[in-house]
Image (tube, rainbow, N blue to C red):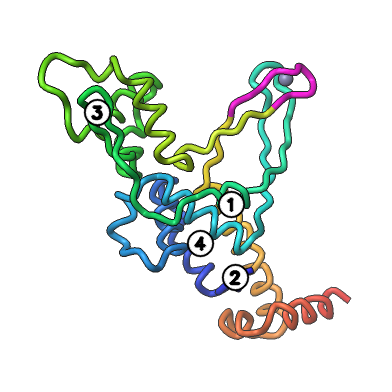
Amino acid sequence: MRTLDEAGLLDLWERGQDRHPIDRALLLCAWARPDVAPERFAQLPLGVVNTGLLRMRAALFGARVEVQLDCEHCGEHLELALDIAPLLADATAQDERADVELQGFRFRAPHSRDLAALAHETDAQAAALRLLERCCVARPDGPAALADVLSEAEEQLEAADPLADLQLSVACEACAQTTQASLDAGSLLWDDVHHHARGLLGQVHSLAQAYGWSEGEVLALSPTRRAAYLDLLRA
Ligand SMILES: [Zn+2]
């Protein structure tokens, strides 16, 4: 497992606090992928962003994910344990995705700026069409309409970038129906970063109060030594 830079994590947490989830995912992605220039993230295919986020999640906090949701048919509370390692094993190492060509149209893979532009669109069908418009880089001569190729284009774009939209089907034991949910890689990693940062701040708080150490001094201690001092304080 990758070792955690705790001061770096607290800094990241502080910078991510007030951001919109799309922006926060890009901040996390920049942290996960220091090999990529920061200005490129907003225009990387969504599957590339999600792969970076999930890899970071697996490396720092493990590959097991607990998903909780309510059945959309009967309201039963559902819990699901998911292993993201197989998703990552299938993910390509390439940062480019092939364009989709369909009946004279050509579409590029959607990226984070597209999602941001659609964030206020409440109608799903209208959002899908606007997304396709934004991703259309060439169109045929004549009267062909984007709406006519919408569902096929969506299917092919999904096949070209499978991790762009992580859909889960969860079966309900109470009513035997299936609920669709999407796994948001940015929120998933952010929740862990948030949880971990709050835990670290709690440790700093307790040790600073007891011994008068600074935040830097507390974080400079190894997690094992910190835990030992916290045990002594509780004893
Ligand atoms: Zn149900």
Snapshot quadrant of residue 231: bottom right
For the record, the magenta segment spans: 171-180
Measure the C-alpha gap from mark 1 to mark 2: 18 Å
Rendered residue at 66%/79% (across/down): 208
Tag 4 residue: 13
Decide which of 230, 61 is in the foreground and name it. Answer: 61
Q: Callout 2 environment at 10 Å: few (<14), some (14 to 19), or many (20+)?
A: few
Ligand 1 resides in the quarter of the picture at top right
Q: Mark 2 highlights which residue?
A: 2
Query: Which badge, 3 or 1, comes first in the chain's sequence?
Result: 3
Q: Residues within 10 Å of mark 1 (few under 14, many from 20)?
A: few
For marks 4 and 1, give the CA distance. Answer: 10 Å
- Rendered location of residue 154, percent (x, y): 38, 27
Location of the C terminus by quadrant is bottom right
Question: In the displayed structure, does residue 15 sit left or right of residue 56?
Answer: left
Under mark 3, the amino acid is Glu
Is residue 204 rendered to the left or right of residue 32? right
Label 2 residue SS: loop
Per the model, the C-alpha gap separating discs 2 and 3 is: 40 Å
| Residue 173 lies in the magenta stretch | yes
**Image depth: mark 3 or mark 4 in front:** 3
Q: Secondary structure at mark 1?
A: helix
Percent coordinates x, y for residue 156 in the rendering: 38, 30
Residue type at mark 1 is Asp
Residue 133 tag number: 3
As for residue 210 lying within the magenta part, the answer is: no
* Quadrant housing residue 46: top left
Q: Which numbered disc covers residue 191?
A: 1
- Depth check: 87 or 183 in front? 87
- Real-space CA distance between mark 3 and mark 4, rounded to the nearest whole angstrom: 35 Å
Dominant secondary-structure state across the stretch colored magenta: loop
